[in-house]
Amino acid sequence: MPSLNQQFERIRQSATVAMADRILALKASGQPIIGLQVGDPDFGTPPAVLDAASKAMQSGFTHYGPSTGYPELRQAIAAKLMRDEGLAYDPGTQILVTHGGIHAYYTALQAILNPGEEVLVPDPTWATHANMVVMLRGNVVRVPAPAENGFIPYLDSWERALTPKTRAIVLNYPSNPTGAYPTREYLEKLQAFAKAHDLWVISDEVYGSLYYGDRPTSVAAVEGARERTLLVNSLSKTYAMTGWRVGFLAAPARVIGNALKAGQNSITCVAPFVQKAAAFALTDPAIQEATAQMRSAYARRRDLVLRIARELDSSKVLVTPPQGAFYFFLDVRPLHQSSVEICERILEEAKVGLVPGSAFGEQGEGFLRMTIAAADEDVEAGFRNIIQWAEAEQR
Ligand SMILES: Cc1ncc(COP(=O)(O)O)c(C=O)c1O
């Protein structure tokens, strides 16, 4: 038997996917499970975006398109970056249209990483941030982002993780799973660190539009950072377009040159009718209004959870308000069980689907990720069930 690619032995099956499979199986057997495990908006894609895609299909945009993305879409992305972040990117040379944020991350790493080089990845974080590095034959160095520091790494932790092989650092703000994001001052210090050691900064901002207080600063907006920043973003979360698979990488032109080769040789192009719909979604004023309404719904559900948390005042499930994204990272350390064990028991006994914090790294142990990208009734009932279950454990 020929051997396989050994890199994949270092990649664990995603706990989020495994949980989703179990929940589907339980639901299929007729059990009334409340699913609070997904990272997918519960809203439909705005109907006008469906129309734009449909019109594009009818008009013949069903063949290969440009690998860089249509100029119209790259311009729409540049306009979005200016509108939302005050960032000026040249649509001709500094933007690549990708197959979702995940592919933007893939092309970014492909563009800069050589085998055996190290990438500093915060812990906890979305599993793909580490897995992709491994897939591309790099090495992951985890930088603790502990709960006691608001899930942001201490600045000297980045320093300590550094070796002569370090090539890049990964940021994801607001974070999946914690919703945390740092101050501009922190990012300025991090930029100075990246500059001092000549590192690339890959900034995954797919939750960049979902925040509940002051707008998070993009590291690309920090003075001097642009030349080393690879900005990853997508329409998935903001526009409720996860299944459309469209995102982008914004980076210095020479990075985009490599990323384009990675994109061209892996997917050829993003489906042309999807690109047309994406350009419409990014620029149409009514769609921006629709996304603002989705954001208010997430804020309402966040308040709902916080209200119930105050009302029930559990000593077993500790709740910190997320700053951004659409997750709560519930602190269940008082239960003194592993997050996988708790997750399994909550699924079986309280009938709520969650993701164990350990799926996001060691620092996530003792936490559970609960989404608020679900109907208000489900968020309320699910959260109450979790607390009730945890309080019963106490007795
Ligand atoms: C932090 C983070 N980055 C990127 C992605 C991928 O997004 P996309 O659907 O745009 O590929 C996700 C999806 O869950 C995510 O949580």
Image: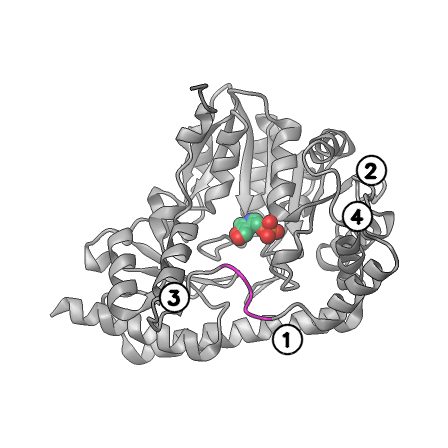
Density class for disc 4 (Cα within 10 Å; few <14, some 14-19, many ≥20) is some
- Residue under label 2: 93
- Are the residues tagged 2 and 3 within 8 Å (C-beta)? no
Secondary element type, mark 1: helix
Amino acid type at circle 2 is: Thr
Q: Would you say residue 364 is visible in this rendering?
A: no
Q: Residue at x 50, y 59 (%)?
A: 39
Give the CA separation, mark 4 to mark 1.
Answer: 27 Å
Amino acid type at circle 3 is: Ala
300 relative to 183, above or below: below
Give the CA separation, mark 2 to mark 4.
Answer: 12 Å
The mark that comes first in sequence, 4 or 1, is 4
Density class for disc 1 (Cα within 10 Å; few <14, some 14-19, many ≥20) is few
- Residue under label 1: 293
The foreground one among 192 and 48 is 48
Residue 289, picture quadrant: bottom right
- Residue under label 4: 88
